[in-house]
Image (spheres, helix red, strand yellow):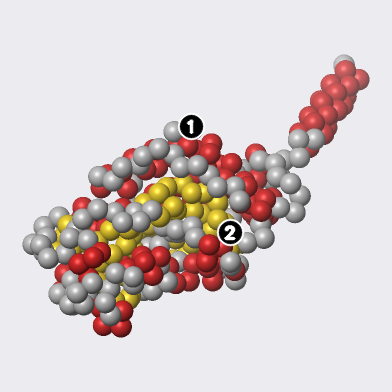
Amino acid sequence: MRITRVAAVAAAATLALGLTACGGDDGSSEGTGAGSKSFAAGSTMERLNKAQAIKIGTKFDQPGFGQKGLSGKPEGFDVEVAKIIVKELGIPEDKIEWVEAPSKVREDVIVNGTVDLVAATYTINDKRKERIAFAGPYYEAGQNIMVKKDDTAITGPDSFKDGTKKVCSVTGSTPAETIKQYVKDVATQLVLFDTYDKCRDALKGGQVDAVTTDNVILLGYIAKDEASFKLAGDNFTKEPYGIGVKKEDTDFRNFINDTLEKAFNDGSWKKAWDDTAGKFGAELGAAPTVNRY
């Protein structure tokens, strides 16, 4: 009887050891989600997955795309697209550190390594590609103009050519550069702040006659205060939004491009839109073609 009990214990120990060995063969790591993904050794994806943490730059003042909510965290389409990427990396959402990234510092926070990526209504253009790289685009917006509800004098960008009207935009933004070609005197007509909230306040207070940026951002402001604001005319540019990463990190850019294309097809991209910016009346349109330059 004693011999039987000893044999049973030994057999159980052997089985447990065998199970432990088998479990170790899958290359998984301890912790939440770390072992659920496998990435090339030395890649940014592997580093982030192992750390189970990521820093993402976005805007905190853009309704529908990246605006701090009651939770104290940013909410919007850019934020949800970033979360799709984070999920594909095998990192829990609560391990994201959101870093405010206004237009004028977006390249800096990428180059300096302050963040791992930027999703912040970030228009892809050649000048920015001199310092950083882009995955995407994941959305195409268009520049427009917001005025007071009762304004009938401003109907589009050409309305600034007479030199009498002031327009506000954000330092370092594509819309700020674009509107310069329409104003008669940049020094007196173009007012620049670090956030669009300040432009909105300046318009409401009468310090400027208009605000210009991408249509979807303006529609977010209008949705929150329809009695005060409206759009003046049609979009007059095309602004493809991309995800900013370090210039030399081709593998990470390709990974994000793959993730975006997957999201275009599995419904998560559309859901992200419908839950955020889509509520303001802007159209999502067809999924853009990713530019794998």
What's the distance in space between the residues labelled 1 and 2, CA to CA? 25 Å
x, y percent for residue 104: 44, 72
Residue 180: in sight, yes or no? yes
Q: Which quadrant, please, contains the N terminus?
A: top right
Residue that protrudes farthest toward the right in the picture: 3
Q: Amino acid at mark 1?
A: Asp
- Compared to residue 183, the image places residue 80 above or below, namely above
Mark 1 or mark 2: which is in front? 2
The residue under the point 45% across, 58% down is 123
Task: Of the two numbered discs 1 and 2 on the same chain, state the one appearing first in sequence.
Answer: 2
Q: Is residue 28 left or right of residue 143?
A: right
Residue 71, percent across and down? 35, 56
In front here: 167 or 13? 167
Residue 28 is marked as none
- Residue 194, image quadrant: bottom left
Question: Which quadrant of the structure image shows residue 112?
Answer: bottom right
Disc 2 element: strand
Q: Is residue 2 visible?
A: no
Relative to residue 59, is residue 240 depicted above or below? above
Q: Residues within 10 Å of mark 2 (few under 14, many from 20)?
A: many
The number of callouts visible is: 2
Residue marked by disc 2: 133
Q: Residues within 10 Å of mark 1 (few under 14, many from 20)?
A: few
Residue at image location 49% in from the left, 49% down from the top: 137
Question: Tag 1's secondary structure?
Answer: helix
Q: Find disc 1 in the rendering and name its residue.
A: 266
Q: Position of residue 11 (x, y in %)?
A: 85, 23
Q: Amino acid at mark 2?
A: Ala
Depth check, front residue: 277 or 218 = 218
The x and y percentages for residue 207 are: 18, 77
Asked whether disc 1 touches disc 2, contact meaning CB atoms under 8 Å apart, the reply is no
